[in-house]
Every structure is written in C-alpha cells, then in structure tokens.
Image (cartoon, rainbow, N blue to C red):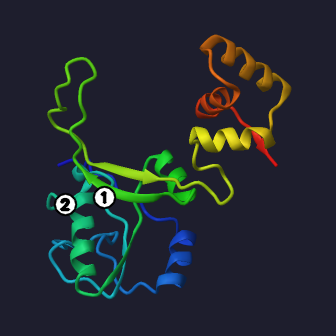
Amino acid sequence: MKDDKKYWLTPPELYQELDQEFHFDYDPCPYPRPENFNGIEIPWGMSNYVNPPFRKSDGVFGAGPTAFIRKSIEEQQKGKSSVIIINTMAFINMLLGAGAECRPMGRVRWLDCKTGKPWGSPSSTTLFVLRGKEGTMKNTDPEIIKRLSSIIYIRKDILEKVKQHQRKRGIDESEAIEELIAAGYEYIGL
C-alpha cells in the first residue's frame, strides 16, 4: 500500500534555537512516529514542541493541524505550555510582525454584494488591529482639521490637488484637506 502522507521535519538549527528558549520535554508529533503512537490521545509534557501535520490528510488517526491545536489548548488548561509551529499565509506574518492585535471573530457570514444573502459555509475569521503610532493624526474631525490646516505644509502638487478638489466640490480648504487625507494623500505636520 502506498503511503501518500507527507512529513516535514523542522530544520535542526530552528529547533535548537527554540529548545534553548522553551526547554522542550515532549514532542507529540515525532518523526519517525512509533507504531500505533497517537499524540492526541496521550498526556503531553510540561513544555511541548508541536510541528503538526500541515493538512488533515497527512495526519494519522484522522488528526490534522486543528486536532493538535485543540489538544494544545486542552494541555494549556492543565498548566502545560506548547510551542506550535505551523504554516500560515505571508500576510498573517506581516500583520503579526507589525504588532497587530488579533481577535477571533468566529465564522462571519459575509453578505453577497449583489443579493445580500449570507455566505452559506463561512470560514473562520480573525480580526487584526493595527493601532496608529504615537504622534500620528488619529482624528480627522473637521474642526480639528480646520485648526490644523494653518500649520500643515503640503507639497506643491498636493496643494494644487487641494485647490482643484475645493473648486470641484465647492468646499472650503479644511474640508478639502480632510477628504484628501482620508483618500490617502500625505501631509507633513509641524
């Protein structure tokens, strides 16, 4: 019988670096896996290195990455730690690297733009929050913009854009600046 399962080993230098930090005493996903070994069914150590199957179809006993995450959470509730290394999409790592806060949102039933009907079988959704850094403009309230407009320097090309926008929309300078900032034009404050 052909074994179509794929196993991927952690590069030794990465494992050693993590082991120096976390001092692992158990691996519920060892390779080679001992015969009849099921890392989901037995108690784990106090510090666990978890490199789960990347897909359910690669796992044994029907256990894919989700089963190992659930088990990690169960072991955490017993006071045990797990370091889980798992493939993610590049944009997730970008968000986490930028300091994003994460919030599980469950299965959001997104609405179809044309029909308004909810998505029949939604995927799990995560909300990422990237907070502005100190000193950035967080409030574009028209009154604040109006007060700040006298101290904002705008590049010549953007100044021309402000004037065109003013004329086109029939609005004052502070409103034009506010709309252009909201549209992504940069400004330099004093």
- On screen, 72 above or below 46? above
Q: Position of residue 43 (x, y in %)?
A: 20, 83
Q: Is residue 143 left or right of residue 64?
A: right
Are discs 1 and 2 less than 8 Å apart at CB? yes
Single out the residue that lies furthest toward the right.
156
**How crowded is the residue under tag 2: few (<14 C-alpha within 10 Å), some, or many (20+)?**
some
What kind of residue is marked 2? Ala
Q: Secondary structure at mark 2?
A: loop
- On screen, 89 above or below 65? above
Residue located beneath label 2 in the image: 63
Can residue 34 be spotted in the picture? no
Q: Earlier in the sequence, mark 1 or mark 2?
A: 1
In the image, 45 versus 100, the foreground residue is 100
**How crowded is the residue under tag 1: few (<14 C-alpha within 10 Å), some, or many (20+)?**
many
Q: Secondary structure at mark 1?
A: loop
Going 17% across and 31% down the picture, which residue do you hit? 118
User: CA–CA distance between discs 1 and 2?
Assistant: 8 Å
Q: Is residue 96 left or right of residue 37?
A: right
What kind of residue is marked 1? Pro
Going 54% across and 51% down the picture, which residue do you hit? 94
Going 66% across and 52% down the picture, which residue do you hit? 136
Can residue 81 be spotted in the picture? yes
Q: Position of residue 44 (x, y in %)?
A: 25, 83
Q: What numbered label is drawn on residue 53?
A: 1
Q: Position of residue 10 (x, y in %)?
A: 46, 65
Q: Position of residue 39 (x, y in %)?
A: 22, 73
